Each structure stands twice: as C-alpha cells, then as structure tokens.
Image: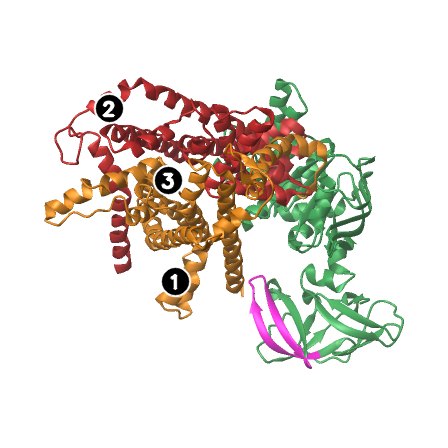
Chain colours: A red, B green, C orange
Amino acid sequence: MTTRRWLSLHGALVLLFLYLPIAVIVVLSFNESKYGVAWHGFTLKWYRQLLAHTRIHPYVWNTLIVAAVSTFVSTILGTLLALGLSRFRFPGRNGLLFLLYIPVVIPDVVMGVSLLLFFAWVQHAVSALHLGLTTVILAHISFQIAYVTLVVKSRLAGLDPSLEEAAADLGAHGWARFWKVTFPLIAPGIAAAALLAFTLSLDDFVITFFTAGPGATTLPIYIFSSVKRGVTPEVHALSTLMILVTTLVLIAVQRVQTRR
Amino acid sequence: MEQRKLFKGKRTRTPGGEIIVRLSGVRKRYDSDTLALDGVDLEVRAGEFFSLLGPSGCGKTTLLRILAGFEEPDAGRVEIAGNDMQGVPPYRRPVNLVFQNYALFPHMNVFDNIAFGLRMKRLAGDEIRARVGWALELVDIQGLERRRPHELSGGQRQRVALARALVNEPEVLLLDEPLGALDYKLRKQLQVELMNLQEELGLTFVYVTHDQEEALVMSDRIAVMRGGGIEQLGLPEALYERPASRFVAQFLGTSNLIPARSTGKREVETPLGRLRVGEDLVPGKDLTLSIRPEKLRLSRQESAAPNRVRARVDDIIYTGAENQYLLDASGFELVAYTLNSDIQEPGYEEFDYDEEVVVHLPEENLVVIHE
Amino acid sequence: MNKRASWKQLLPTLGPGALWLFVFTLIPTLLIFYASFLQRDPHGWLGGPLTLENYRRFLGLTSEGFDPIYLRILGRSLLLGFVTTLVSVLIGYPFAFFIAGSPRKNLLLLLVVLPFWTNFLIRVYAWIVIFQRKGVLNALLGYLGFDPVMLYPSWTAVYVGTIYTYLPFLILPLYASVEKIDWTLLEAAYDLGAGRIQGFWHAIFPQTLPGLVAGVLLVFIPAVGTFVISDLLGAGKAILIGNVIQQQFGASRDWAFGSAAAFVLMAVVLTGLWLYARWAGERGMEELV
C-alpha cells in the first residue's frame, strides 16, 4: 500500500518534470509581453506574426519533402532487407547486421560528420552531390533504413512460420504467397516502421545540420538558428504548433491501434 | 457408444488399396549431432488411416514435413501416388497438411481461408463457391463463412483447418497432431468425426500423434517411432498384444517388464521364478518378458500349476473402471488391473492391503521381447 | 530461416539495402577512420602524408609538452553520460512500475511518449526559457523572496537539459519489460522465504534487465555524443566531445582532427557497448545457474 503511494507521488513529480517545460512554452506563446515571463494578457499575435512570415514556408516544405521521400525509399529498402535477413542464411549475414546497427548505436554527431565527409569526398572526386536537399534525403534514408529493417524484422520474427507453410501447402508460391499471405500479415509492422521513419526524419536536427547545404534548411535547422539568436515569443508559438501536431498524430495513432 | 461401433468396424476392414506413399531409406539430419530420421522405410496404402506415433523428438513430425515438402531428405526416396517427390516443392505436391496450430490465415475469413487453395489453382468463382460450400457442410460449420479465425472456438478452428485441406481433394491428407490443442471431450468427439470422414470419403490419412490411446482408437495401422527410426509397425492390436520391444510395450499402455533368461525350449528363469512361455526359445539367452496388467489373474487359491507366483498387495488404486493393484512378488514389483464390472461375476475377488495373493501369468499372454 | 539461399533469392531482397548500407554507412565510417590519419591542407581540405599527429594532439602530446585538454573534454562527456544515465535510472525505474501498476496506463504511456516525440530542440529550448536571467525560475524565486540564480548558461543547465531530453528514452523500453513481468515469481520468492528486498532483487529485477539495458544504452550513447544541448544551454562555454567534433567540421575546418575526435568517440561508445554486453551477458549467465 505504502509502496503504491510512494510510486504515485514519484509518478506525479516525474510527470510535472516532463510537462512543466512544455507548459511554460505553450503558456508564454499566448503572452502579450515580448520580453520576460510576467503575464501581460492573452494574445494570438505571435501566431499571426509567425504565419505571416513567408520565409518559413519553404522550410516547412523542405522538411516534408525530405521526410516523405526518405520514408518512401527507406521503407521499401528496409522491408526487403528485413525479409532477406529473416528468411535466408548466407555468408556475411552477421556483417550485414553489424552495418545495420551502426546508425542505431553510434552518436548522431559521428554519423553526421561521416556523411558530410563522404559527400565532400564524392564532390571532390567527381564533382557531384553538392550539399543540398538531395544529400539530406540520402543521409536520412541511411539512418531510417536501419530502424525500418529492425522494426519489420521483429514483426517477421513474430510471424508464425506455419502460416507461410500453409500457403505453400495450399499451392501458393513466389509473389502470390507474398502478396496474399506474408504482406497482409506484416503490413501493420511496415506501417509502424514507416511512421517511425517519417517521424525520425521530421525531427532530425543533427544529421541534417551536417548534410544540408544552402537552400536545404528544414524546420529543425530554422528552430536551432532562431534559438541561438535568442528567446522570442514567435519561437514559443512555432514550438507550440509543433507540439500540437505531435499530440494530434500520437492520439490518432493510438486510436488506430486500440481499434485494432 | 458410436465410438465403440466404429472401432469394431475398422477392425473388419482391411485396407487393401494400392500403395500411395512409399518411403525408402529416408534420412534427415538437422545439424551435426541430431539425426532426425535414420533411414526410414514405409508404405502407406490408399484409403488407410495410418498413424505415426511416438514421443516428441522421435522424428514423426520431420517425416510428415518431408511428405508435405517443407523439408528435403538428405538421402532416400519419397514417392507419392507413384511419383518421385525429389525436388517437388510443397505447392506442387498432391498432399495437404492440417497444421498442429491450424495455421489459419488471421487476415482472411473462414470462406477465404477454405477457398485459398482453390484460388491458387485458378478455379472459376462458381466452382470455388460450390466446393467451399461442400467442405463447410462436410465439417459441419455452415454459417461461419464470414467469421475471422479469432472469432472461432478451438473446435471450429480445427474444422476450418480440416476443410481448408480437404477441399483440395488431396491424394493424402497429412495431419500433425490436429487434436492436440483441444480439451478431452472435444478431442474424443472429433476423433469420431475424423474417422467417419476418412471412411466416408475413402481418404488416405497420415496422422501424427503422441497420444497412444488416440492412435489405437483411430488407426488402421500404426508406426511407432523412436529416435528417428520406426520401432514397430503394424495393426493397433498387434502392437498392443505383441510389442516387439520394451519401448513399444511401455509407450503403448502399461506393461510389466520382467527380465528373463531362457533355460529351456519354452522355459525361462526370472526374478519371479521359473515361467513357461508360449513360444520356442534358444536356451541361454537374456530376454525380457512383457505382460499387460489386465492379463494378470489374481486369486486367493493356492495352485501348483505353472506360472503361478505369490505376491503381497502393496497398494490399491481405484480409478473408477478398474482396480489397479501394486504387487510385491518376492521383491519384484508387478501391476495388475481388474475390471470393476466383474463385480457381479462369479470368481471375482477383491483384495486388501498386505493381503497375500497368487498371481497367474498366463503363458499365452507372456510376450517374449528379445532385448 | 534455415535455408541456405541462392543469389537469385538474395539479390532482389538484400541487394539494394546492402548496397545502400555499404555506400552510405560502411564507406563513410571507413572514411572517418582514414581521414583521421590525414592532415588539413591549406584549402581546408584533407591531404597526405599519413600521420599520427591528430591522435597525438587528442592525447595532449604537443610540442610544448603534455596538455590533455581533449582528454579532459572526453572525460567531461563521459561524466555527463554516466550521471545522466544514473539519474535517469533512478527517476525512470520506479516510474516504469508506476505506469505498469496504474489503471490508466494507456494515458500515462501517451504522456511519456508525447515529450519523447516532441522535437528535442523545443525541449532544450524550454529550459532556456526557464533558466535565463529573467526566466521562469527567477521570476518564481523573486516572487518567493529569494535572490535570482544564474543558471543559464551553466553546466547545471546542461545536465538538467540532458536528463530531461533522454529520460523518456529510458522509461519506454523499461516499461515494456516491466509490463511483461511475471509477478507470480515474486509470490514464489516470498513463498520460499525471501524478504521484500531479496524478493525484488531475485524475482523482479532480473525480469526488467532487458529493458533496463536497452534504456541505459539509449540514454548513454546520445548523452555522451551530444553537442546541441551543451551548445544551447552552455552557450558556448560548456565544451563536450560533440562540440569539438562539430567545431572542427565547422568553423575550425580541420576535418582531419575532427575525424580523429569522431573516431575516438565512436571507439569509446563501441567499447562501452561491448563491455556492457559482456558484463550483462555474464550477469545473465549467473542468473541462469
């Protein structure tokens, strides 16, 4: 009983710790005062100012393009990798797994500079791949592919092998078996992996920071440079909007999951 | 009741069809130190209910998977319906498998599950509907077409799995412990239905089970497997009455195993003393005698006739249908069963703890095992 | 699974992904290693001959004598990683049990997941708003009659920000383990005479270990490698190994030395990972006996 009480008290404090900073931003985004934290009255003017800034639009656009393209490519490549890795035994399988874990375990900054070095080296050698949206997309795919593969692979590992055997026993093989049995069964896993990849891309700052060239500014890069310039109510407003979007997406995802 | 009738009915029927499955010298090794199958030879006749019986790890499931085409044997030959199955993938084999866990496709309803094999054969829609309807009726699950597997009970799932395999009219239906996940009553009921179905349709069943009672009840012939090989193959009653090895004697039912040494043409020396047996022996060999507990006759009357030994009642277990006596025959332990229904019959005797009894081991029931 | 595959099966499934990993993961990683033995050329690019100079510099072996500034920075990063991990475990471990035991666990889980998915720049930014000179904290202190504190920029802010940022990374995998706990083991332990602490240690803790290990790695690795949090909350005064790397690839434009620093960080993380796996593995062995 007492343990439960302590846990609840602790839990409440942790939730306070997790939410206080977020609440501060949200509240201040509606504060009339431009400087300081004293409450000077409710206003939406920071949101109006933010939306009036047309220069943000391309950043939003860039972020979405990068996320969409990289998620599309990494989901396909990662799903195929997961299928191959869980189906077949072959020499070099462990080496491939090791490569797959590199983007997951090494710090972002190392991955970022190694890709920067790689792109610069290619550029130096063949004068291609100038830093820009393309390099950001390539870089994002490179870390997403690992996450997609691992998520789909775990879904495949949870798949009852006798289902595919049953399909074979009943005359299905090759693509028929894949599309009629395997794919529908792992589709939720693929969807979850794609959602994860998409969110990772939307959120990424570090790797984008190193691989983005001029004209490839994404929203996180913009937030970083704004924050470095100082605290402003507009950044509060932008942050609040992003928190809102995250919340809505998460609630939608949970709704879908509980319905299933 | 019905079960009993079918049981008898099967005994009179001798499966005499042509050979539909033939295995010769089939060998399979998973990794360097586990031999799954060690040169198995086997013939199954058309229309036969053939069981592979054995404890887990005996190779029975591997054998079934080789027939289904999920495993390739390392050596040996597999023939189904006269064709060599070497290199023939599962989807081109004239067999279908009922999986142990049913392996119903969770994303398809009952109709689509059953229609799956027919669609793979690209049959016309009308014919698919007709044949699925026939299969649904066959296993008595009409009206469940639109249900998903997770909305079905265990017994219903089992029936869907059966229908999904049967609808393809396989030459041989393979069943991998299909009743293993069901509770006792349902299992008994489905045993009867499976037997009826098999007889009505004249199908060939290759049935894997570890349940000796199930195998005895259902099969025309049984192959008892152990350690990757066939220990003994024959009619159920032959396996039960004349086990060829200690393993078979103990795996199928309970048996008293008595170490013995042949002393004469029909005489052996045992810890119970000298016993007469019903077959000719070469003297001076070490053997084992096997006798079923229900074949022992207990009495209070002393007798000088052969094959009588004295024993003391150590323990009595009442199981409802029978009394099980644990006997101490001068240090050797024997088990004897007496039927409770004999209570009305003359000569029936009940015994008490620590009572001295005379045990008769009829020589015609003493099975000599050359081990 | 146990089929030995042919090229015909491997190429269409693994081919594209393997090629991608080879080009965009293996080659860049090898390039970092290679570049760490090169030198900066006058154009800010890399050139030969091969040298150990970058590593000597990192170890503090300069021509003017021993000055281990980079080793100290590395030490600071490791300290940040250890402290962050430790505090996160202390906070997160009971919290995972709190969620698992709550009747509203789905809501609570959502409440943890939300900060987890909120852009981490925003989460760091929030602490600037709290800690800055005229920030929320000082407003509160002033209201209560205390003197203001100067926590931005400071190491304290960096620590708080790092713990805040990575705490959900520990809670989520840990919760996954806690939720799967078989509590009958605890009852069995009590039944066999274990006390509360022994019961927890032998029956519950081992079951949480997989999630704990995963969570610890997910906190420790990014915490050691961070440069954004120290950059923002330390305002250029808190230098970590991540900042060194970023500066060398950025303003200082000494990619050779930056590569050496990056390689050292990678080596430290991978060694830690390996050691931890070994330690956890041995622990796992002991539990089996």
Percent position of residue C79, x then y: 39, 54
Numbered disc 3: secondary structure = helix
x 67%, y 64%: residue: B254
Q: Amino acid under label 2?
A: Tyr
Q: Decide which of A51, B368 is in the foreground and name it.
A: A51
Q: Amino acid under label 3?
A: Val
| Chain identity of mark 3 | C
x 25%, y 56%: residue: A5
Q: Quadrant of residue C234?
A: top left
Magenta-tinted stretch: B310-331
**Around disc 3, counting alpha carbons within 10 Å, would you say few (fewer than 14), some (14 to 19), or many (20 or more)?**
many
Percent position of residue B76, x then y: 82, 45
**Secondary structure mainly formed by the magenta segment:** strand
Comes first in the chain, label 3 or label 1 = 1
Mark-to-mark CA distance, 2 and 3? 26 Å
Mark-to-mark CA distance, 2 and 1? 51 Å
Magenta run includes residue A216: no
Numbered disc 1: secondary structure = helix
Per the rendering, the mark at residue A47 is 2
Q: Are marks 2 and 1 on the same chain?
A: no
Question: Which image quadrant: the C terminus of chain B?
Answer: bottom right
Camera-side mark, 2 or 3: 3
Numbered disc 2: secondary structure = helix
Q: Which residue is identified by label 1?
A: C200
Q: How many numbered circles does the render carry?
A: 3
